[in-house]
Amino acid sequence: MSFENLKLIEPILRALKTEGYTLPTPIQEKAIPIILEGRDLLGCAQTGTGKTAAFAIPILQMLYKENHSEREMKTIKSLILTPTRELAIQIGESFSAYGRHTGLRSKVIFGGVPQKSQTDALRLGVDILIATPGRLLDLMNQGYIHLQHVKLFVLDEADRMLDMGFINDVKKIITKLPLKKQTMLFSATMPQDIKKLSTTILVNPANVAVTPVASTVEIVEQSVYFVDKSNKKSLLIHLLKEKAILSALVFTRTKHGANKITEGLVKAGINAEAIHGNKSQGARQRALNNFKTKQTRVLVATDIAARGIDIEDLSHVINFEMSNVAETYVHRIGRTGRAGAGGTALSFCDAEEKEYLKDVNKLINKTISVIEDHPFPMKNFNVVKSDKEGNRKNPSGGRRGSSFSKERGNSRGRRTVRKF
Ligand code: AMP
């Protein structure tokens, strides 16, 4: 199936040619005709599948074909809500690229930067607004944004909105949209809350699912190192020095952790930068661009900063810590192996994170292979738990402690059990 078969208009076909797209991806093939028909859509797809174009192309086409009165030309006719600034910027770039011959105006707004340039652009009139929820609500409350003319609404990365605690903001925004509109909801996973939300905002939607979460995992080679927390940095430096790792995105749980790891890497002579929510928008974009253009070899990121970022030819994802949410593991490793290309994901798991690894294995329905031969084998097999007062104590046969004792390494620190 070609883009021409999808009945796309010439200005868009021309732009896609410039982008170098020859064939639609599966989500585009499925979603574009449905959206062009005017139907609501529930799309189960991750970033990397081409989902942005799957909604951006039909939105541009529909708005281009409409005849807008002078007054309408100044109003926001399509709203795209997305959880992070990086995603908003990427979506904005996609609308500009695919819509370059349509004359339609799109604008991206997000928090963490002064609002003036955003409000100036809004005053001039915008057809398509791409926004993160916080800044959008803020500008709505200040009277800069009115959504009563929105006809096409996209809720992108809905599961992530939920994880990041934006769902109430999203619900508030939805109440300001006209009842009669076309809605597209995209989510990589479909937790119960998102299913529930979808039933309230979608009317007779068509369901489109591509690359279910677990199958992304097939193309990425995955392994795990059991290592004590205190040795993780040394193991990371060792791997980056020893292994043929061309580029690595290292995930860590906290902003402070990202800074500390980056400092350690730089001290060890490894070219690294950090990206997280405490950095200014400019610093984040610079770090991301340096990484994308291969000027930086290692980017250390928190999940929020890395969500959805699209990096070509990323060879390795390294999970410095296991996430306590199994789906996050899939999102993280999905940064490599984009567009069907292979990639490698390495995870560092300490005693306390073993339960998280178990959850991941269950979600992806396979057991991640364990690399036993490394210079920092796990020595501390005790899970330290906190009691209610926050005091750390060893469990006496608690779930984590007891399951782990079965897998004690031998005297050389080698593991005797591979699966659990
Ligand atoms: P997304 O899932 O929207 O984040 O897109 C992932 C990447 O695929 C982006 O770099 C897009 O530019 C690229 N892409 C989207 N559609 C196509 C296509 N039909 N052919 C080639 N690349 C595409």
Image (spheres, rainbow, N blue to C red):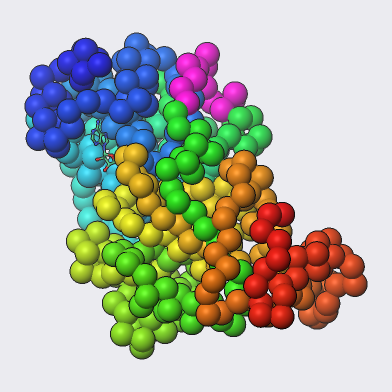
Q: Nearer the viewer, residue 165 or 76?
A: 165
**Residue that sits furthest to the bottom in the current view:** 267
Vertical position of residue 383 compared to residue 57: above or below: below
The image shows residue 172 at horizontal and vertical percentages of 53, 40
Q: Nearer the viewer, residue 129 or 377?
A: 377
Taking the spot 32% from the left edge, 20% from the top edge, the residue there is 29
Taking the spot 60% from the left edge, 44% from the top edge, the residue there is 366
Query: Was residue 393 drawn as part of the magenta stretch in this picture?
Result: no
The image shows residue 273 at horizontal and vertical percentages of 33, 73
In the image, the segment drawn in magenta is: 198-209
Quadrant of the image occupied by residue 339: top left
Check the picture and name the quadrant holding the C terminus.
bottom right
Vertical position of residue 279 compared to residue 21: above or below: below
Q: Is residue 106 visible?
A: no
Check the picture and name the quadrant holding the N terminus.
top left
Taking the spot 45% from the left edge, 63% from the top edge, the residue there is 318
Position of residue 188 in the picture relative to residue 69 (left or right): right
Position of residue 68 in the picture relative to residue 168 (left or right): left
Q: Is residue 4 visible?
A: yes
Quadrant of the image occupied by residue 92: top left
**Residue that sits furthest to the right in the current view:** 396
Q: Nearer the viewer, residue 238 or 322?
A: 238
Query: Was residue 199 drawn as part of the magenta stretch in this picture?
Result: yes
Taking the spot 72% from the left edge, 75% from the top edge, the residue there is 410
Position of residue 230 in the picture relative to residue 276 (left or right): right
The image shows residue 354 at horizontal and vertical percentages of 68, 62
The image shows residue 319 at horizontal and vertical percentages of 50, 63
Count of all numbered marks drawn on residues in the image? 0
Q: Quadrant of ligand 1?
A: top left
